[in-house]
Amino acid sequence: MEWTSEKFDFKVQRKGLYQFSFSNKSPYHGTIDFDVHVDHYTYFDQQAKDEHLAPLLKQIAKLEEALYNIQFEQHWLEAQTDRKAIVNDAMSRRAVHKAVFESAALIGTSILQVYLLRRLFERKLGTSRV
C-alpha cells in the first residue's frame, strides 16, 4: 500500500463556498487528512481610503487601551506580590520570635519547677530525720 502526501493550490476569482471531493480507487479503506488554508491577497494598485483606515484606527485605539489596562493590572499585581512578600517575611520573623520566646519560657518554667520540688523535698527530708 502506498501513501502519498501532496500539496494542491487552488486560486479562485470569487468569494463563496467550495466543495472538495476525494475518491479512492484502491480496494482498501484509507483515512484522508487534509487542511485548508485560505490566503487573501489584496491588490496593491488600489489606494487606501479614509473609510478603510477609520475602522483600523479605531481598533488600534481599543487595543492600545486594552494593552494599557493589562500593563496597569500587571504592575498592580507585581506591587501586591511585593507587599504580600514583605508581610509574609514579617509574619515569619514574628512567628520565629514567638516560638523562641515560648520555648525559653517553657524551659525556664521547667527549671523553676525542678528547683522548687528539690527544695520542697530537701526540707521534708530534713524535718523527718529528727
Image (cartoon, rainbow, N blue to C red):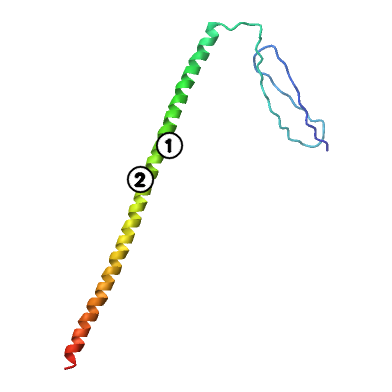
Q: Amino acid at mark 2?
A: Val
- Label 1: which secondary element: helix
Q: Is residue 118 above or below residue 6?
A: below
- Label 2: which secondary element: helix
| Drawn side of residue 45 relative to residue 23, left or right | left
Structural crowding at the residue carrying mark 1, measured as other residues with C-alpha within 10 Å and reported as few (<14), some (14–19) or many (≥20): few
Q: Nearer the viewer, residue 80 or 104?
A: 104
Residue at 79 percent of width and 30 percent of height: 24
Where residue 107 appears, x then y in whole percent? 30, 69
Looking at the rendered structure, the number of numbered marks drawn on it comes to: 2
| Drawn side of residue 17 relative to residue 29, left or right | left
Q: Quadrant of residue 111?
A: bottom left
Q: Point out which mark residue 87 bears.
A: 2
What residue did someone put label 1 on? 78
Where residue 71 appears, x then y in whole percent? 45, 29
Q: Is residue 114 above or below residue 27?
A: below
Q: Amino acid at mark 1?
A: Glu
Q: Nearer the viewer, residue 27 or 85?
A: 85
Q: Is residue 94 above or below residue 105?
A: above
Q: CA gap, disc 1 to disc 2?
A: 14 Å
Where residue 59 appears, x then y in whole percent? 50, 17
Q: Nearer the viewer, residue 70 or 107?
A: 107
Reading the chain from its start, which is encountered first: label 1 or label 2?
A: 1
Residue at 69 percent of width and 28 percent of height: 35
Q: Quadrant of residue 80?
A: top left
Residue at 24 percent of width and 80 percent of height: 118
Residue at 38 percent of width and 48 percent of height: 89
Q: Quadrant of the C terminus?
A: bottom left
